[in-house]
Image (cartoon, rainbow, N blue to C red):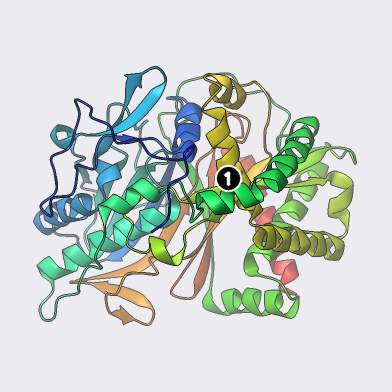
Amino acid sequence: MTTMLPELALDSSPHPHTSPPVSDGSPPLFPLSLAPFERYMLADDDANYPTQFFCRLHFHGRIEQGPLETAFQVALARHPLLTALVRDSGKGRLDWVAAADRLPKINWIHEEPTESLPTAGHLDIRVTPGVQLSVVLGKDRSDLVAQFQHVACDGVAGFDFLGDLLVAYANLTAVGNRCRLKPLDPHLLRQRATFGLTIGKLLKRLPRDVAALLLRAIGFYKRRPVSIIPRIPARSELPSDYPRSRFHRFDREETALIGRVAAASGTSVNSLLTRDLFLALGDWRDRQGLACAEDWLRIVVPTNMREVGDRRMPAANLVSLVFLDRQMAAVRCPDTLLAGIVREMALVKREESALRLPLLLSLLRWFPGLLAQGVRRKRCWATMLLTNMGPALPNCLLPRDAGRLVVGGLTLQNVDVLPLVRRHQPVSFAVSTYAGELTLGMHFDPRTIPADEAGALLSVYVRRIRESMGR
């Protein structure tokens, strides 16, 4: 069993908001101290700029209300952080606490599904648990939209939760064999901030990591990445039609071609799409008359930090961030740009440098207020976020028809994902693949970038991807 690191350890001392002992005699899970990445997300969260993401499932068929309500409770019981709240326990200590009296509910909307997602608000994790469902119920189609607070879990965990929800629903509605839910161990959540590190491993790599952190921090602060547009957004309330989105779906032939092109280039689809996003950003800024060779572009790429031993862990944040910086002058040569991204991502994997962000966030807990001051400064920290979710619902064992999940009397047709946006980062992209089709989900902030400009940016990105495909 992994030894807990002192600076990353999750405190479990007595607390008034304590969950009852579990049936096997183990100590109660709550209270549970926030992990470093969770504190970072909480510091960044704002009612006007929430750290939230969305997953939308498009079904052929009508979802049955009773079975889904029951299935929702089954899934919630398996993922404790999605039914918990954050409490300030004093002296800067933040804990997850049980919130059995405030369990999430499902919002039922009786109308035909459209391209837009249902209007949502801010999930304040201090008041409301970190997941909410909305169902848009049409005549013979249904959309299920899950809104997740990133303080509680990441996108991979969101897919795991939804997979459990679908299995529970199918078991209540399907005729025939029931599908088993994989066993989960909620007490593994105490290890969610260790990333497999023992004290010995930490001490071995600490001198190298501290030096690398210092060098990276100097470069990170010295470079001032530009936003996609020069407008400085005013602090205004969350739009009444939040979230705003655009989507593009590549068909199976195109998706397979993207994979073949990446393989022929000796790289991954993720690196190829990252390169194409840099190229699209360069094209976009040229069209806006903002072409300056010295400007820095920064793309944030989330990295899944899960290991084999985390398979039984319920929904949580096991993620880090990689920051890729390029000057405008460097995005003029596609081949050189791709080669540089491939080298950088290989170095991240080889040196496990994605662990350095959790380490830095752990150290910042000893400097109260510094983290909050940093994330809320009035400057652009990154130009854009690109998260590649990979296959949607990969661990769901329900039967499939032509690659599409059969959920009782429903068929899951498509899956959309929307990442979070920030004040100076008004557009973010998510990539996911389902039934052999790759989908780009673009979340944009209309307070900063109008819908027509956001649509044009998506078109530029799609064009660059198709050029990479030779089309």
**Picture residue at 60% right of the left edge, 47% below the top:** 203
Looking at the picture, which amino acid does disc 1 mark?
Ser
Q: How many marks?
A: 1
**Picture residue at 35% right of the left edge, 44% below the top:** 147
Quadrant the N terminus occupies: bottom left
Q: Is residue 415 left or right of residue 247?
A: left
Q: Is residue 96 left or right of residue 342?
A: left
Q: Nearer the viewer, residue 438 or 88?
A: 88
Q: Is residue 426 left or right of residue 331?
A: left
Q: Position of residue 91 (x, y in %)?
A: 40, 17
State whether residue 370 is above or below residue 216: above
Q: Is residue 41 left or right of residue 66?
A: right
Q: Nearer the viewer, residue 254 or 94?
A: 94
Quadrant the C terminus occupies: bottom right
Q: Position of residue 78 (x, y in %)?
A: 22, 54
Q: Position of residue 45 (x, y in %)?
A: 46, 29
State whether residue 31 is above or below residue 89: below
For label 1, the SS is strand
Q: Nearer the viewer, residue 197 or 137?
A: 197
Residue 286: in sight, yes or no? yes
Name the residue tied to disc 1. Answer: 428
